[in-house]
Amino acid sequence: MRIRFLIPVVTFVGIAAMMWYALFNLNPTEIPTEFVSKPAPEFSLEPVPGYGPGLAQEDLATGKVILLNVFASWCVACMAEHPFFMELKAQDTVDIFGLNYKDTPDGAAKWLARHGNPYKRTGMDLKGRVGIDFGVYGVPETFVISPDGKILDKIIGPVSPDMFESRIRPLLNEAGS
Amino acid sequence: MVAEIGQFVLILALITAIFQGVFPLIGAARNSQPMMRFANNAAFVQFAAITAAFICLTVGYITSDFSILNVANNSHSLKPMLYKISGVWGNHEGSLLLWSWILALFGLAVAVFGRNLPDSLKARVLSVQGLVGVGFLMFILFTSNPFERIDPAPLDGSGLNPLLQDPGLAFHPPFLYLGYVGLSITFSFAIAALIEGKVDPAWARWVRPWTLAAWGFLTIGIALGSWWAYYELGWGGWWFWDPVENASFMPWLAATALLHSAIVVEKRDALKNWTILLAIVAFSLSLLGTFLVRSGVLNSVHAFATDPARGVFILMFLIVVIGGSLLLYGIRAPMMKGGGLFAPISREGALVLNNLLLSTATATILLGTLYPIFLDAITGAKVSVGPPYFEATFIPLAIPLIIAMAFGPFLAWKRGDLAGVVSRLKFALLLSLLLVGVIWWQQTDTPIMALVGLGLFGWLVIGSLLEWTERIKLFRGPLSASWRRMTQLPRSAHGMTVAHIGVALVILGITASETWQTEHLGVMRPGEIVSVGGYDFRFDGAETVAGPNYDAVRGTFLASTGIEKGVYLYPEQRRYSDPPMETTEAAIRPMLSADLYAVIGEEDGKGGYAVRIYHKPFISWIWIGAFVMFLGGALSLSDRRLRLGAARRARQQEAATESLSGAKG
Amino acid sequence: MKSSFRLLMLSMLLAPFLVLSATAVFIEEKLKDPVLEARALEISAEIRCLVCQNQSILDSNAELAKDLRQIVRERIALGESDEEVRGFLVDRYGDWVLLNPPFKISTVFLWLGPAVIFILGAFAMVVFLRGRNRLVEDESRTKLSTTEEAEVNRLLKSDETGQNS
């Protein structure tokens, strides 16, 4: 009969353990992609004027792992990852495609001219509908795409070198071996 | 200089709090008078020190001393004085300082007014209060120091979020904290009682006024917050079941339950274990809310995750305070003996039912609030728990609660007569059914929930009034006799009637505004007229106006029924520069019968503006009802039996009852 | 945009409770048919806005919320059922977007929890009340003279009407 008086403390221990785990491991603002190991949605977009051929669903299946980066000239956080993407391009580590989200052709072209172009292909999603089909809800986001055009993972927010090593490099190696 | 003084007195307060937490506790165990008395002095010093710290920070804000990081981050020289002052607690660090200050204030109140408390109980209460203070002061000093300097000082501050520059929100946090911290006193009493191993009606007589006060402040705090959401967010919504709102609603529900169960302890010496548990849980939920809001665990607060030290600190604090006290409860509670006996159909029985429903509602909201974290932690799946869930689970619990609210007060203590009560409530049942019938007859497609809501409103108002008239035997004799009875009725009885009617008014406001709201959403050109809820709204155009620290587009609407002269509404779309942000200022014409609510938005480039116009019947009654509830609480609080000097006399009376029951057994 | 967003989020910590609206009230193209428009608003009210913490897309002034409202309208105009419209969004953003969590294995405890808590609580209450009551009956069978009972009641009553205090 005494046990029932311990119910509150036991319940609390459960809640506290969960909080502890959540505090260190969970990020409530990140909504992971629904597309893991599913093919990318269908789309076909014009390029940013002067920046390579356009971008469509079938272009994503390249036979190797690539990145699809959602960017915009109005996006301040994109500047944080841009130099790193330029570096990746210079070292030829991985091919990056650019999905220009809710931007103007002129704005996007100027931005790329000013900061450099790390992208092999670009596509302009003027109305943001392709972004929504991809489940994009903020810029920047970066999708890791498998050799056969399936989505492997999505990174929300700017990609840092650390994040690249921990979340993208393993996927690159896996496909390479 | 003020920052250094502030820092110094805060450290002083921490040291005092540590002593206050330790010595009286030892003193009470060893029955050492000087050590117990020390608690009083410590409480006074702690209060003085934190008051000084608070003044220092306020001076920093008033003088716009941007060499203090906290001021630089949250204030601006152009800000109106009211918001410079409310800016003191409009940020994480300052709000914690306010928390600690109120905690010390209440500790002082116990020290000063608790003269007729038994020495050991008082010493232990103050000691627990001191220990809670230690936690908060450490939190402030180690992770959230409001007096941190910044060098070089910026030329001007970065400003307070414009959404917070609002009278409703300036006073919402202090009220809420008064409520949360008021519950710390009942918590301290509960812990002290567990240590002593004794709970008696005198204990309940002490706990009840504090619960009442905390409950009243929470009621006002929550009402202010929802009122702010109503006019500031521009969609006319006033409650969103947001985790942060739930964090304030759960302690309120628990405090409401505690308020009622403490009556049973006071009058009948029963439900002691349960009341102690509720006192612990109510304060724990306040702390949990603080954690949820500030740790980044919930979706509201990602930015704090950048400083996980704070989250870790609060969580450890929670584990020590809540875990420790619940463990103490688990060990000590079984030793407490239950007192008074009663039949299931009795006032006590009704209050137990009240507690069952309120506790289940609290637990349900806790479950819904934590479930997304729970699921994410276990399976990694993301789920949202929104208003539909809370409405679906809360309403079925609220309905029986409201039905019982009219029954309960009619039932006699120990053993009630349900059939008798039903027959006395016939009138209420009849009238509320009549009300529902008339509404249905007027409008046969009225949603069923609207009929239920209005029926409950009628039932509760009439039931409460019937009970009140019966107590004073109105119309059962000469009016002068009834008047005499009314003046002799304890204020707590009047308070209960008033508070219950307040609940009924809230139900009226919610039901009517949800059911009969009409709206117009669209583009309007100057000169255009739309008809909403029986009013013609004429849009007279918009102009740009300059405020003290913002620019605004201000629209002009004339709302008239054709009979009266009509009223002008001036909604604004404001653009603040520090920090850069836009806010919508709805224009609201509150009336008892309905609110007229207008919002202006973007221009379409052709002279038209996006507008939203709402006609919300009876919505003001939500806040009027909340205020009436608060008044009921205040009235009860002024009851002379709860006044502090009366405790001894009441205790004597209790002794008389006890000796009598002793004679029986 | 990002920096003001950060500020917004920062401000949330400060106010004990807060639901944030960001920018403008937009001009939107509504569906011609008022019945369909009403359905679109009803669905939107239960779709969670992804960038504004805790509002529905109906209540949010964020740009993405506006786009999603428009998508809801388009799907309805295409003749899709409410379920299909919701499905379209769930395919892209997951169950997270549904403010009304669907009943499935992962939410069993969420939906049944309140009932379970209530039943357990009610059970405990019944046990407790019966315990008290049995004692009352024992008591009345053994002792309790009517005069004593009356005296207790008088005292309790006087306490209530405050005549003695």
Image: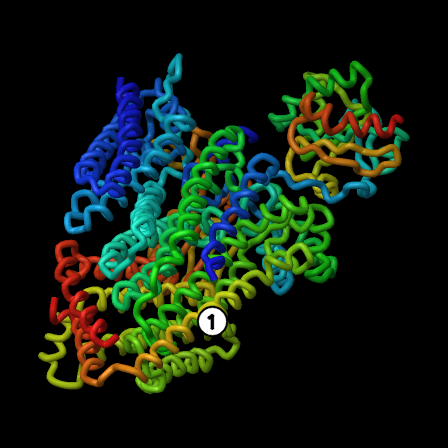
Q: Is residue A26 left or right of residue B390?
A: right
Residue at x 17%, y 61% (from the top left corner): B651
Q: Nearer the viewer, residue B504 or C89?
A: B504
Residue B170 pos. (x, y %): 33, 41
Three-letter amino acid code of the residue under disc 1:
Ala
x, y percent for residue B444: 50, 79
Residue B553 visible: no
> How many labels were placed on the picture?
1
Quadrant of residue C113 within the rendered picture: bottom right
Mark 1 lies on residue: B450
Quadrant containing the N terminus of chain B in the rendered view: top left
Q: Vertically, is C152 above or below A121?
A: below
How is this picture coloured? rainbow
Residue in the foreground of this view, choosing between B116 and C82: B116
Q: Please tell me how crowded label 1 is: few (under 14), some (14-19), or many (20+) other residues with Cα within 10 Å.
A: many
- Across and down, in percent, residue B387 comes to 53, 56
Q: Is residue B100 left or right of residue A56?
A: left
The quarter of the picture where residue B508 lies is: bottom left
Q: Quadrant of the C terminus of chain B?
A: bottom left
**SS for callout 1:** helix
Is B286 located above or below residue B48 in the figure?
below
The residue at the point 41 percent across, 42 percent down is: B321
Above or below residue B388? Residue B181 is above
Image mark 1: chain: B
Residue C65 in view in this figure: yes
Farthest residue, direction top: B152
Front one among B114 and C63: B114
User: Which residue appears at 46% of the width and 46% of the height?
Assistant: B244
| Residue A132, horizontal then vertical, whole percent | 70, 42
